[in-house]
Amino acid sequence: MSDIAIVTGASGGIGRAVALAIHEKSEGGLKLCLHYNGNQKAAEAVQAEIPNSFIVKADLSNHQGRKHLLDEVLKQGAPYVLVNNAGVDKPHEPALMIQESSFDTLINTNLRGPAFLMRDFGNEMVRNGAGCIVNVSSVLARKALVGSALYRASKAALEALTLQFAAELGPRGVRVNAVAPGFIETAMTAGMDEAMKQKIVGQTALASLGAPEVVALAVCSLIENDYINGAVIPIDGGMIL
């Protein structure tokens, strides 16, 4: 049975880049599980780029979807890497206009999903004596942007969970870290208002948006370096400075 690297949200820009980088860095030693929950054609396109990979459709905001993903992975081998990349950034609502339905959407996808995937895949990794989890947070976990109240809360909580899981799983052979991207050139940012995009670029020390590949490189570094545990690595071009 193969060691499996699971990338959630693998049909998107960052997810695709991460999956490709893991495949390349591991020289095919890790079998890729490419999770998606929307665009099947995009997921199949990524699968076509990575030999010996497989796709799984699942809604990770609920127990049934997470169980389906775990079951499909265990049919193929032992989970060794989990990259919690799947997430949503909408609805955008100013703090005084947040809705309970928006809370449910953002928290269920960005926090509940990764939390219980860490629990379930973490248990499998502990049983196997080794593993690595990388959560994808955001620069907005530590920076205010109007309309991002609930999104940033979900990512800040994910960073706190990253540290807690790192403390508890580290002694058992499983490392847990996170990356915190700034604004990356993906379909998500492509839909942004141009004036807002320029404002964000102006707040970034390197005066540019990042490419998905820079996030992928950081994720792979956290997978490869076996003495990093409980870290949150900013990949934001200096936006947080």
Image (cartoon, rainbow, N blue to C red):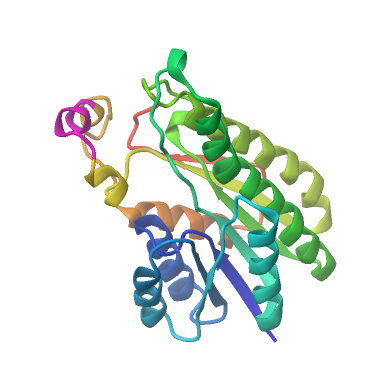
Residue sitting at x 35%, y 73%: 41
Is residue 148 at all visible to an observer of this figure? yes
Instruction: Give x and y (percent) for residue 83.
Output: 56, 58
Instruction: Give x and y (percent) for residue 223.
Output: 58, 60
Q: Is residue 137 magenta?
A: no
Q: Is residue 198 magenta?
A: yes
Q: Which residues are magenta?
A: 192-199
Instruction: Give x and y (percent) for residue 134.
Output: 58, 53
Q: Quadrant of residue 111?
A: top right
Q: Quadrant of residue 124?
A: bottom right
Q: Main secondary structure of the magenta part?
A: helix
122, above or below 143, in the image: below
151, above or below 170, in the image: above
- What quarter of the picture does the N terminus occupy? bottom right
- What quarter of the picture does the C terminus occupy? top left
Q: Is residue 77 left or right of residue 31?
A: right
9, above or below 166, in the image: below
Of residues 227 and 186, which is closer to you in this image? 186
Instruction: Give x and y (percent) for residue 222.
Output: 56, 54
Is residue 228 at all visible to an observer of this figure? no
Residue sitting at x 36%, y 53%: 214
10, above or below 50, in the image: above
Q: Is residue 199 left or right of residue 23?
A: left
